[in-house]
Image (cartoon, helix red, strand yellow):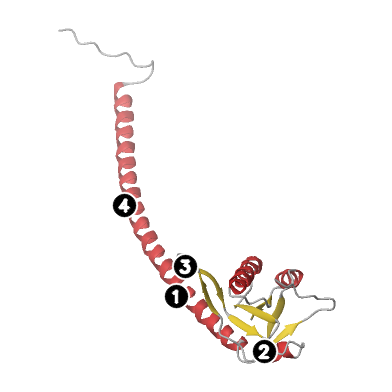
Amino acid sequence: METTIPDYPRGVTFEQVWALLQEVGQKQKETAELLKETAHNMKETDERLKKTEKLVKRNTRQMGDLHNRFGDLAEHLVAPKIHERFNELGYHFGARSPGGHIIDGENGKIKAEIDVLLENGETLMAVEVKVTPKIKHIEEHIKQLEILRDYRQKLNDTRQVEGAIAGAIFDADVKKATIEAGLYVIEQSGDTMRIEVPDGFVPRKW
């Protein structure tokens, strides 16, 4: 059998081609090692990401618990003498009620949750308490006020419903939107709360 020896480019020796092949082989070996190392590093990175994810979940849960405790603290700060603050505006509320849940009689689900409820012979004042009120809380509270009104009307309670949002930290835009929605703004002031009533403010009634 005749063996055919390939023709190399002119000026290139067999030894040079062989050296080039060896170099390519070495590069392939180095590339394989690099891919192996990369895969190992990716595995370690994945494990670190999983640990980080668990840590984030744990911290989020702890922050949520802390936020709830802040909410309870804010509510206790608002509740004790809030009726006195409103009575200074001429409402004549008795001692505050702790509020509570409004339950759907058909499916037993919670339809609304009122943090603090004040009452007199003409008005029900529902106060929503947040550590840091947001724009979204305004619309949420308005829906709760509508639910409270409908619920009381079914009980032949025709008193008007008004609303307020209390917060420890009020951003200027949130305060403005709250007032424009016809809700009272209750802010932390030292170790108590104060109601801000700007000129021309008319509380919305449901």
Q: Say what amino acid the circle numbered 3 marks.
A: Lys
Quadrant of the image occupied by residue 128: bottom right
Q: How many angstroms separate mark 2 from mark 3 (CA)?
A: 30 Å
SS state under label 4? helix
Tag of residue 40: 4
**Pointer 2 or 1: first along the chain:** 1
Residue underneath mark 1:
62
Of residue 102 and residue 5, the one placed in the foreground of this image is: 102
Q: Position of residue 114 (x, y in %)?
A: 57, 77
Q: Nearer the viewer, mark 4 or mark 2?
A: 2
Q: Say what amino acid the circle numbered 1 marks.
A: Gln
Q: Residues within 10 Å of mark 4 (few under 14, many from 20)?
A: few
**Pointer 3 or 1: first along the chain:** 1
Residue at 62% x, 86% y is 78
Q: How many angstroms separate mark 3 from mark 1 (CA)?
A: 27 Å
Q: Are marks 2 and 3 in contact (CB under 8 Å)?
A: no
Residue at 33% x, 33% y is 24
Of residue 32 and residue 105, the one placed in the foreground of this image is: 105
Quadrant where the N terminus sits is: top left
Tag of residue 83: 2
Q: Nearer the viewer, mark 4 or mark 1?
A: 1
Horizontally, residue 63 falls left or right of residue 193, namely left
Q: Say what amino acid the circle numbered 4 marks.
A: His
Residue underneath mark 3:
109
Q: How many angstroms separate mark 4 from mark 2 (CA)?
A: 65 Å
Q: How many angstroms separate mark 3 from mark 4 (CA)?
A: 51 Å
Residue at 37% x, 56% y is 45
Q: Position of residue 197 (x, y in %)?
A: 78, 81
Q: How many angstroms separate mark 4 from mark 1 (CA)?
A: 33 Å
Is residue 55 in sight in this rendering? Answer: yes
